[in-house]
Amino acid sequence: MRVNRPDEPSYAGGATFQKVPLALEARDLAGADVAFVGAPMDDLVTYRPGARFGPREIRFASDDGEPFMHNMELGVDPFDELNIVDHGDAVVTPGDAHASHRAIREAVDRVLAAGAVPIILGGDHSIAYPNLAAVASGYDTGSVAVVQFDTHADTATELGGLKWSHGTPFRHLVDDAIIPGERLVQVGLRGYWPYPEEFDWARSKGVRWHRMSEIFERGIDAVVDDVLAEITGAEHLFLSVDIDVLDPAFAPGTGTPEPGGMTSRELLRAVRRLTVERGFVGMDVVEVSPPYDHAGITAMAAHRVVCEALSGLAVNRRDGKPEPEKSN
Amino acid sequence: MRVNRPDEPSYAGGATFQKVPLALEARDLAGADVAFVGAPMDDLVTYRPGARFGPREIRFASDDGEPFMHNMELGVDPFDELNIVDHGDAVVTPGDAHASHRAIREAVDRVLAAGAVPIILGGDHSIAYPNLAAVASGYDTGSVAVVQFDTHADTATELGGLKWSHGTPFRHLVDDAIIPGERLVQVGLRGYWPYPEEFDWARSKGVRWHRMSEIFERGIDAVVDDVLAEITGAEHLFLSVDIDVLDPAFAPGTGTPEPGGMTSRELLRAVRRLTVERGFVGMDVVEVSPPYDHAGITAMAAHRVVCEALSGLAVNRRDGKPEPEKSN
Amino acid sequence: MRVNRPDEPSYAGGATFQKVPLALEARDLAGADVAFVGAPMDDLVTYRPGARFGPREIRFASDDGEPFMHNMELGVDPFDELNIVDHGDAVVTPGDAHASHRAIREAVDRVLAAGAVPIILGGDHSIAYPNLAAVASGYDTGSVAVVQFDTHADTATELGGLKWSHGTPFRHLVDDAIIPGERLVQVGLRGYWPYPEEFDWARSKGVRWHRMSEIFERGIDAVVDDVLAEITGAEHLFLSVDIDVLDPAFAPGTGTPEPGGMTSRELLRAVRRLTVERGFVGMDVVEVSPPYDHAGITAMAAHRVVCEALSGLAVNRRDGKPEPEKSN
Amino acid sequence: MRVNRPDEPSYAGGATFQKVPLALEARDLAGADVAFVGAPMDDLVTYRPGARFGPREIRFASDDGEPFMHNMELGVDPFDELNIVDHGDAVVTPGDAHASHRAIREAVDRVLAAGAVPIILGGDHSIAYPNLAAVASGYDTGSVAVVQFDTHADTATELGGLKWSHGTPFRHLVDDAIIPGERLVQVGLRGYWPYPEEFDWARSKGVRWHRMSEIFERGIDAVVDDVLAEITGAEHLFLSVDIDVLDPAFAPGTGTPEPGGMTSRELLRAVRRLTVERGFVGMDVVEVSPPYDHAGITAMAAHRVVCEALSGLAVNRRDGKPEPEKSN
Amino acid sequence: MRVNRPDEPSYAGGATFQKVPLALEARDLAGADVAFVGAPMDDLVTYRPGARFGPREIRFASDDGEPFMHNMELGVDPFDELNIVDHGDAVVTPGDAHASHRAIREAVDRVLAAGAVPIILGGDHSIAYPNLAAVASGYDTGSVAVVQFDTHADTATELGGLKWSHGTPFRHLVDDAIIPGERLVQVGLRGYWPYPEEFDWARSKGVRWHRMSEIFERGIDAVVDDVLAEITGAEHLFLSVDIDVLDPAFAPGTGTPEPGGMTSRELLRAVRRLTVERGFVGMDVVEVSPPYDHAGITAMAAHRVVCEALSGLAVNRRDGKPEPEKSN
Amino acid sequence: MRVNRPDEPSYAGGATFQKVPLALEARDLAGADVAFVGAPMDDLVTYRPGARFGPREIRFASDDGEPFMHNMELGVDPFDELNIVDHGDAVVTPGDAHASHRAIREAVDRVLAAGAVPIILGGDHSIAYPNLAAVASGYDTGSVAVVQFDTHADTATELGGLKWSHGTPFRHLVDDAIIPGERLVQVGLRGYWPYPEEFDWARSKGVRWHRMSEIFERGIDAVVDDVLAEITGAEHLFLSVDIDVLDPAFAPGTGTPEPGGMTSRELLRAVRRLTVERGFVGMDVVEVSPPYDHAGITAMAAHRVVCEALSGLAVNRRDGKPEPEKSN
């Protein structure tokens, strides 16, 4: 169902990602290739809150009034190739993280039941657990690989005594055997956390990671080559993008920024390559905190990460061959 | 058509004023008592632009996730008493003010054709012309009175050589005999404009106005008493609220702020009284410029002006008697 | 224990309210007349978070580098008359509101055990429950009256299915017989909440309230006269100040701002008069959300509310007679 | 010399207050009635700096592209009645307050030598000393009265060991016999400073002041009546307006904001009345700190204070009779 | 004509770029090598407005109070080598883009008539049409090459039905044979626009472009080598710099930001090399939108782009040999 | 002395860098390896002030509530290896730069007397003089090398006639023979200052520098190699980091930002390498101006520069061998 009028400017109308049709009811999802789910919760952050306003701002972070797009690096319009809808926001309950996780899980399940690829707009990173639990449940164990772009490994057993936190989802996903450790690849780690215990656990589980210094030394392309190799064995790909993987210059509007991060062009390039080569069965983009953003640039970066992933998926389903626009 | 889910937080979902149903098509307007129209244009401002983002931010400026409300001064829930829908935004064309005015006029006409009261969210104040031209066309000449809350009289014949401007609509409305001068009452004028020529014209046409100093000296209640007397002869009321009537402390997010203005509680009180006593056949709220706002307080003030008007209309249609919530 | 050096500028050093000594351990509280407790939690808000950063910013919102002060309306220096210390922040757990409430309760209990008056800096308004439960436990039932400055009554039984919320503390305080309904007086209510059910409950319990319109019509002095009469029967006074009682112009940095509120000078004047006349046995100042503040003006308003209360307490303990500074 | 083109929008061109001619050289001042001097220094503030950017922002805080104006309360265009020029900024030296004071003094002296009324745009309030020293030197001792709108008395002998500070000018002006104590009237004092010593000194010198509470209780008009009576004996009037006399809601962009202050309409009204009745021989507007401002509202308030003073001066020189624009 | 005083700090005085003399009248332009023209219009943007405030902020974006400068990469002071003046702003008419274009054209024509190189400070990118139409008219057809740094190709035939827009100037410049397609080289294209139609047209016309991915893969130096080769045949160079070619991290204050862009050092380096090697006969810097800027960093980037171009021009006219400052 | 409670969130409590113990008195410094000194002065800046608020914001710029840290590039927790305390802020006097310099010198002297390494948090860069004068006095002449990360050389003899300024410390340090010219290495110079005179002086003194273009062309690693070679002869290293060496995208909150600068990851990497290899005997981090910062990203960058230096020092004192966390 279109909730916007043709030809309106980007800032007219509202509500859906890039003004795709709203598919609020489960039945509206029929036939969709991709469906968005908003997860406006930030109950489980440990520092700056605000990510509950993330889905709204990411959806609006476009200067285009229509679901048209021409990716000049890939030569594709994902809105043309794919049937993309917006399933609205999960009915979260502020102050009750568990109820919110359940609501998010149910929304993602509805998308999966319709055969569509879910793209979940966070919200804090704790939602990776319900997101991946939902997605992985539809596939053979170990067939889903996760590439996590993130400053922080998010592999604590607990933070402040809390098992469920934005700093713990990947520990529990692995320990609960939802995602085998060897199927988890982390890109962009930096800073002063986690502690040795978490790194030791990760090594024992076969988790792979690429610190920022590796990206600095070898370049993002070489690191993506490695990531592609590391996920070769898995049939499916899930992308989990914590926007704080970007340097605060590129993403000030996030809960736990860490200087020294990726540039936007590195992240967009990496997502483009991964999705062109592997497509994806699910994705989340998290930790956009609008109260700390400026001129919407963080929401915009998150929006474009999604656009690159959609474009990559479209190419992957077409013939896997980018057709960049070149001059003579 | 509901575009939101029950029980979601205010910041989930989106698109409509206070989450009323979206009525995008003309046929969806059937049965509506009130319908919102967004007019996201700012082409005709002379100083700070940005009002094109006004409709979006006004719609969202609520901490309530449902179209429920209990006005404690009036003892009424307008969403309960009235069938209120959102007709979305007029399909304006940035850079083409005339096309935008036409689109706004058409949207308001659709609302009127459905027998609903239009509330237009601006946008710059130039839209008062199409708004009032549409509304007045349905009634006998002179039967519609306009109460304009505004810092500026907006009665120039032209500004910078332009006949159509946010500083001219009320001149043309009167000169074009759409609104007789005696049916126009301006509240909140202050500052250093217009010039004597405009004041002379206004006096010659029978326009009445109340400068800020009068509100300061006599109090808003006394001024509203006068306004009610001044519009006694008219059958219908149209409210045109330029948010810059508020002092910049209360409304920094506007195009031509002027220190020394009304407080929010004066404006809300005035709108409440006028609408309780007279109801209204149309309303616009204009000149909210989000790029200059802080923490959304200007959009919030505009949103509450609408809420008071809706509440007043509901009481007016009920029995005209406020039932304030009092303790024993 | 002083944690600052004499003669440093306000922006040097840090940590305590107006640079009073830090009394981190229970034993350090001995001899204190007043002790601050920070309650940096915002887990139970329903709209904009950020109040977890409130205590830090309120403490720093001073241009004075020393705990000296001369209240020119009262002719008193509370830091001279009273032994005031800062007990630091309760060890809250982000994401676990119940643990945080327990930690706040314990911190307030330590202050009370030392015979000092607690001033709790929030944090969201849910903390009124542990705060008042702690304070009331030391006095005969019904001997503590609460004057609550607030936009919202905060008397829901639950919000979004949650019993504990920033919108429910006063319902439970009354229903749990911690504060009898007749001992609760609310000042500044406005807007579109609560619903009739809550107002009916409040009337049935004998709660008294003063809407903003009453302040507008009669003036704050007349309303304070009434409030003083309404709490005559109670031996002790607790002040609960939700900073959103101020208009967003004066306090943009709060979670659920509502246009049409009090001015700073009305609030400071009311707090001054109440505390001069009645002193107080406890106080909280809540809902300062720094991410939405500008130039620290909201934190500053909260800081000054505390300064007026401290000054009033000092005069109340001296001889109850203000000695304003007058020129000849 | 015009440095702007006719008919340009307000945001085109630049440099002078309301686009009056630039009179950079002493000789250019010949024939001027009023001349602006910028004093971009903030070396002597004790808290938030930034006022060095005040003159620039105050000059630009207009939505009008021409030096035309019609004051609707007074019925006058000061730019029509008076020859107003802008003498540019004093060549201050950042880091050397004494050199800056000298440069400011010299610039004001040049204006006075040309027979024009100086309006100095600060800058921190320490500049009141050179400003008034210059102005008073041209008149009989005691013939110049000063009305100071300010939160703070600025009558310390020293602050942090420094004799010259933004908190001391009026002490030294009186103690140095430049302005007799009985010729100094302060309006808007509030908060927790100065200390009893300063108040005692002020009483001993015959200084008069009006605290904010007096304005609250009696209204600004009654206070202005008193002020007019208090300065009756003096032949000439100098206005010193510290923008922090306004509440932070109206003037967040200042160095030492203090909640509980004046509203813009009170200040504009007071300045209007004083200048209509008495004219003025000099004026400064100080402590606008743009880095802490939002949407320019503080600079705008300062700009309008000047506009009211200019308008009042024009009426005073005309016939002293306001001719407000009234409807029939 | 100097409108500033020697030795004043950067924030004193005002009005001209880097405080060069103001040359407001055509006759004042005599002898100038370079002259600035402000083009404060944003009527033809499709998303965020605000660029009308660009010229003012770019002019002020300097921490230097004098037109002195020592470019340490080139060993040159352009203000020493060249006679640089500021022709002020074109007298644009807000709301009338065509009148504004005419005014801009006339101002640029005046500069050209005086034999000076025009540097136009925008304003939205639609002004490239009058700018280039003016510049190209003075040279043989095809002798002027344009290097356009931009995210967007700006080669639509129309946007929203409007031929004149900030998204169309280069289409019309080529189609109107003002700039042959082979003389247009675009650098920095990225994102999801234009559509295949525009790319096909561009190829058919011989336009060359360099996408961001090419800069990422080959480095800016290699791309500049290519650009230099591509413009070899043209006698003259015009630079058109849309500040949105920078990543939003470096230029948040622009109308249609697009993540994944150039860094400031890449852009400054590219401009430096191009101008050293080729000099230039005209330049515009556009789309700086101050309402969306933070701490002036976007205006500052635009200001430095101009400084590098001026420095490059000075070296080009000297002997073409950079003399970087090196340590022993 | 701990001034914080264990397990509190980062935003609870306050006052010290990363919540290390406060060592306010000289005797509290006994046994410390490293001690922080705040230098909250900005009296000697020439453009944007605000750095007086730098120390407070840098100290708080952490999302960690405890002095624990695990540097994943180095495999070390400096808070575990080193005894780190915070000596609070020097008692500066706003408006009296010389008194402030003395106070800073005394505070650094106290740290040095205790045998600890001082890390001074500025404040403007003028403090490099007292800082280095103090540090160098404890070692043989010429045994201390200084690596200065900075946009500006800060080697003027005077600015605006002032010998002491944030633009002069390194001139006087060399001319006063505190630091021999050959022991000063500058990294990151760019822009349009200093002038040839300063460069000539620097060459004559044997100062070495690395312009940004060198970092761009050769990479930061090659430049750090050179720097290490250039300081080989010196026994000790002092690091002076002016945060404006970063591009404004990464550090908007500084007094004299200059586009075209370093990225955070380059700076952190350079500091890490230098300190691992050479340790350091003193460090300052200066020119963080919070009023111009956004979301605290500049303060955060400064905080992390310190964290990298502390980590490097810990490794240097351990065995000099980084143990990066790698996956299998």
Image (spheres, coloured by chain):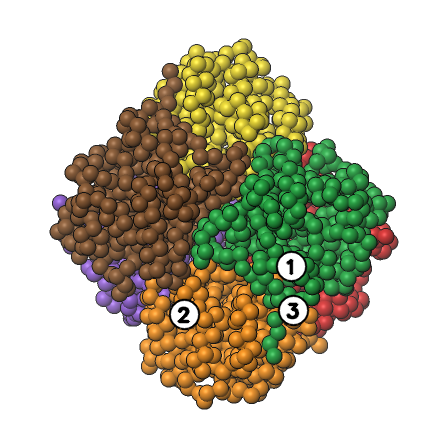
Chain colours: A brown, B green, C orange, D red, E yellow, F purple
Which residue is more in the foreground, C169 or A103?
Answer: A103
Chain letter for mark 1, please: B
Q: Position of residue B287 (x, y in %)?
A: 63, 46
Give the residue type at disc 1: Ala
Disc nearer the start of the sequence (1/3): 1
Label 1 environment density (alpha carbons within 10 Å; few <14, some 14–19, many ≥20): many
Using the numbered discs, state the Cα–Cα distance from disc 1 to disc 2 in whole angstroms: 32 Å
In this rendering, does residue B113 appear at all?
yes
Q: Nearer the viewer, mark 2 or mark 3?
A: 3
| Residue at 34%, 27% in the rendered image | A74
Q: Position of residue C324 (x, y in %)?
A: 63, 78
Q: Quadrant of residue A49?
A: bottom left
| Residue at 41%, 70% in the rendered image | C163
Q: Position of residue F276 (x, y in %)?
A: 21, 48
Q: Are marks 1 and 3 on the same chain?
A: yes
The residue that mark 3 highlights is B323
Q: Quadrant of residue A300?
A: top left
The residue that mark 1 highlights is B314
Using the numbered discs, state the Cα–Cα distance from disc 1 to disc 3 in whole angstroms: 12 Å
| Residue at 45%, 71% in the rendered image | C157
Q: Is residue D260 left or right of residue B228?
A: left
Which residue is more in the foreground, C88 or E86?
Answer: C88
Chain letter for mark 2, please: C
Instruction: Label 3: state its secondary structure.
Output: loop
The residue that mark 2 highlights is C163
Q: Is residue E247 left or right of residue B57?
A: left
Chain letter for mark 3, please: B
Give the residue type at disc 3: Glu
Q: The N terminus of chain F appears in which quarter of the rendering?
A: bottom left
Give the residue type at disc 2: Lys
